[in-house]
Amino acid sequence: MQFTIEDRGTYTEVVANGRLNMVSAPTLRSTVDEAVGAGSRHIVVNLASTDFMDSSGLGALIGCLKVARQAGGDLRIACAQKQVQMVLELTNMNRVLAPYATVEEAFARD
Amino acid sequence: MNAFWVRLLVVLTVILGINYIAWRWLESLNWEAWWIAVPLVAAETYSLIDVALFGLTVWRVKRRTAPEPPVGATVDVFITTYNEPVEMVLETAEAAKRITYPHNTWILDDGSRPELQEAAEKIGVGYITRGPEWANRPRHAKAGNLNNALMSTSGEFLLILDTDQVPDPRILDRTLGYFNNRRVSLVQTPQYFVNVPDDDPLGSQAPLFYGPIQQGKDGWNAAFFCGSNAILRREALMQLGLAGYVKEVERAVTAALKSAGAAVRRARKSPEASNPLVTRLLDDVEKAVTAARAEKAAGAPLAEVTYRVRRSVDNAVQQMVAADMSAMEADLAEIAAMDFGSEPGVAVPDNLDQAVEQLSDRAWSPLGALESVQAVLDAISVDRDDEAQPVMPLATISVTEDMATSMRMHAMGWQSVYHHEILAHGLAPEDLKTMLTQRLRWAQGTIQVLLRENPLLKKGMSLVQRLMYFATMWSYLSGFAAVVYFAAPIIYLTLGILPVNSISFDFFIRFLPFMIVNQLLFAVVGRGVSTWRGQQYSLALFPTWIKACTTAARNVWFGRPLGFAVTPKARQDGGPSWSLIRPQLIVMVLLVLAAVVGIVRLATGLNEPLGTFVNVFWVVFDLIVLSVLIKAVKYEGYVIEERKADAVHD
């Protein structure tokens, strides 16, 4: 798993490549922590190339959401693949956090 | 042990028990003395239910042989500590390092001791302590300690060890194989103590629990998590945490949206509301909340609903501040235009936008004046700001996080395993005071779970799984029954008042067969292990059990603190402390006095011979039960004798 950060002007895109699982969850946490610490308060996690997510990965996303909210910003997710969608539904997490179809749409209406 | 004979004895015990109790309720009650007759028959009914639940538990005792462990599983070994001596932590950590299956060892230090951190680095094990996010938030004791560590580690499986539980090198090789079944989330092994003499004065070993009871629960897929010497699947814990998070956020947002209307109405009546700007702000808040309710009802994700509320309120606040500022600007310009010459100039703020943003910030916002509105708006949130971590995998509803956690895992459809082999050697308390604190804590935790998440009403578990959890909780109510059992003979012997119509042939023919078969059941199930200590303590510690029930109920229903104390691991010196068992000593004196008075009354013809005989017999039994405490008070700690065999008797 590898995370890349791109500044998109009004928001920051975090691209998550590979498997977002218990092994990579702590890295996602520190990546987002750093980005928020550096002043990016609006974050979109791009899951287009995340082919697997487990509940530790999802737990890390929630932890990151809290970090962004407490900094006065927000964290959104986009481009969830089928398996990720299933995990969101299985855990009922889609009641709280729903993915946007594209990265651009995530903060488009703000 | 032959399952057939156990089941036959269970069936006989229940039939004979019902035969006796039905007769007691229907035929034998002395209604003139209802104040003792009814409590006594209720206590006897309690005991019958207890025995029946025990019978159900041992109906399907499961004996397992360990499957081969998988290759390449990742494991974190967690040693939880708070204030135990550094040497003790290190001894366990060194033993954990020697576990043969590949793993990472971590010391979870809730005491944040620099010397322990240094020592951990020296011996090459990980060291984890709470981060700044835990400051000023509930710490949730051991559950919080474990939850914190779960966020910064990544093993697929977690072996949890108390500081005083020294693991055997084979502990993972013997247990990981069960996880080849992908639905298994927990493998619990026995807790066994090496510093306990053969006569076990403090009743530390629990051979019946870490034996037929856990094996029986395992037969029903209901083996409990007992806090230490257990291996857990991270995925299952995280799922629990996520499910709990969604539930909690849903509950909190629903409640906050509900109470927001009332908070705004109250704010409108406050003196601040005379300001038209405030009125407008309150209008905006109300609008935002109404919109949020509609969105939520339409099924919009809560992250968006809550974000939009915050956005609209922030905008409204900014507009209000901006309006204030431009008025101020106009005033300042006017003042400047008056031109007082020699007076130092009044400067207009250079960067008005920045000033507006700063003054609109949460801490400086004019909404701060309307505290109740601010509080409600803060609660319309998905970040669980009241907790250090939004996701709490181990249950935090009880001081015994273990039982609550495994119950929730069972309710989610996960399976558990009890592996009956001693794979860790622990230390038990060596003095009565510490032991009492520990028992009180276990009982309080169990009752908390009963009151917060009654297993009988818990969705997702089978009926017998529910009963297995309920059985353990039920057994902690024994304190109330014990008081009645002690009171009944005292009342008869001193006052001549019998709770039954008469002690007659009818009584014996029903009571004795039940009692005999019941004791036979215990003997067969507990074959070879001593269950007597356990029976003694379940009655003798009645003040502890009652205190646990009352404090836990006050805690759950009225939010009072439990008076929770971490069990000290080192012996607290200072000679026998009789004051610890004052209520029991009083009961013992009363029992002896009652026997003397009873015999005098018999001699003077005031009491009948049979009643006196039965009740004196009962007094003697009670005294034998309570006598364990005398031994316990005088116990001066463990002196090394011959070490006991390492294997659990089988």
Image (tube, rainbow, N blue to C red):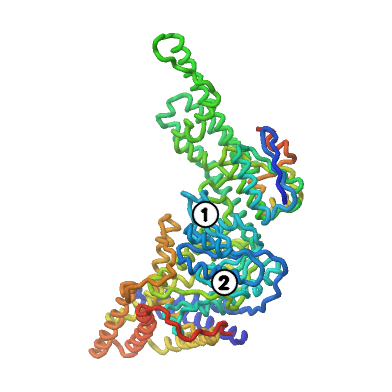
Local packing at callout 1 (Cα closer than 10 Å; few below 14, some 14-19, many 20+) is many
- Mark 2 vs mark 1: in front: 2
Write down the residue under mark 1. Answer: B130
Nearer to the camera, B128 or B203? B128
In the rendered structure, which disc, 2 or 1, sits on the residue that comes first in sequence?
2
Amino acid type shown at disc 1: Arg
Picture coordinates of residue B528, whole percent (x, y): 53, 87
The crowding category of the residue bearing disc 2, from other C-alpha atoms within 10 Å (few below 14, some 14 to 19, many at least 20), is some
Q: Residue furthest toward the front?
A: B122
Quadrant containing the C terminus of chain B is: bottom right
Question: Is B199 drawn above or below residue B173 in the view shown?
Answer: below
Q: Is there CB contact under 8 Å for labels 2 and 1? A: no
User: Tag 2, which secondary structure?
Assistant: helix
**Image position, residue B507 (x, y; %):** 42, 86
Chain letter for mark 1, please: B
On the image, numbered disc 2 is attached to which residue? B95
Task: Answer above or below: position of B334 versus B144.
Answer: above
> Does residue A97 appear in this view?
yes
Could you tell me if residue B450 is visible in this image?
A: no
Direction from residue A76 to residue B520 in the image, left or right: left
Which residue type carries mark 2? Ala
Residue drawn at (63%, 49%) of the image: A29
Indicate the quadrant where residue B415 lies. bottom right
Q: CA distance from mark 2 to mark 1?
A: 24 Å
Nearest the camera: A43 or B50?
Answer: A43
Whether residue B398 is situated above or below residue B481 in the rendered picture: above
In the displayed orientation, state which residue is furthest to the left: B604
Where residue B627 is drawn, which disc sits there?
A: none
B353 vs B182, nearest the viewer: B353
Classify mark 1: helix, strand or loop. Answer: loop
B546 displayed left or right of B457: left
